[in-house]
Image: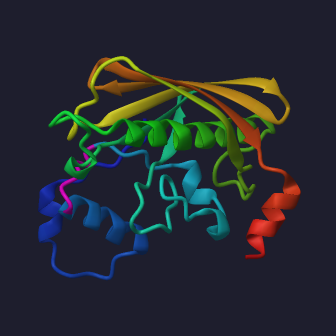
Amino acid sequence: MPVLFITQNFLKIQPLKFCAKCIIILNRIKRGEKMEERVTKAVQDYYPDSFATCYGCGRLNEKGHHFRTGWLGDKTITIYTPLPEYMGGIPGFAYGGIVASLIDCHSAGSASLYVLRKNGNELGDGTEPPRFVTGTLKVEYKHPTPLGVPLKAIGTVTEIHPKKYRIDTEVFAEDKVVVTGEVIMVMMPEKFRETVKQK
């Protein structure tokens, strides 16, 4: 699995000219987020700028979560560590909505990866990944989700229509499945895509 290893010592480096992605990573480390594991080749890196501002997965949203979704064999993966400010009603555990957001964006990225590969393409070959919107989102909370622990959303994509896909996701906290999700993603109509690009 492609991951990036970063330690707190990275913050001691003398000022350099960092790229925008590096600055975002540094800011998240300073906020206390553990970054030991991170998907390095993510579909979100290949979305056009006009589709890169989502609060969940938009790489250009400096205040967002920056969920990143990539391949893990024939499954998909998104890794995210919820911060203390996302605490739910129980101290030390995550607010349920943040986990639902993780599953939602993970599913959109998973559908995009699946269709890209289905059409004979891969990330980085110059083909723009297709974009999806959420049709339905079903989340089942099996156990409280701890804060400060990397959550791994592992997804399986099933085609139910050429423009509609079901993503079944298990969210792991360490080795325990804490949440599952079943999401229907619908391919964004071309007319709507063009409208967004023009804004």
Total numbered labels: 0
x and y percent of residue 146 in the render? 23, 32
Q: Is residue 92 above or below residue 31?
A: above
x and y percent of residue 104 in the render? 54, 39
Say which quarter of the image contains residue 173.
Answer: top left
Q: How is the image coloured?
A: rainbow
Which residue: 22% across, 38% down? 147
- Magenta stretch: helix, strand or loop mostly: loop
Along the viewing direction, whichever of 185 and 37 lies nearer the viewer? 185
- On screen, residue 139 versus residue 85, left or right, reads right
Which residue: 75% across, 44% down? 121
Q: Quadrant of the N terminus?
A: top left
Q: Which residues are magenta?
A: 31-36
x and y percent of residue 47 in the render? 64, 59
- On screen, residue 27 versus residue 74, left or right, reads left
Which residue: 28% across, 29% down? 145
Q: Quadrant of the C terminus?
A: bottom right
Along the viewing direction, whichever of 85 and 70 lies nearer the viewer? 85
Say which quarter of the image contains residue 176.
Answer: top left
Magenta-drawn stretch contains 39: no
Say which quarter of the image contains residue 39.
Answer: top left
- On screen, residue 12 versus residue 51, left or right, reads left
Which residue: 58% across, 36% down? 107
x and y percent of residue 87 in the render? 24, 43
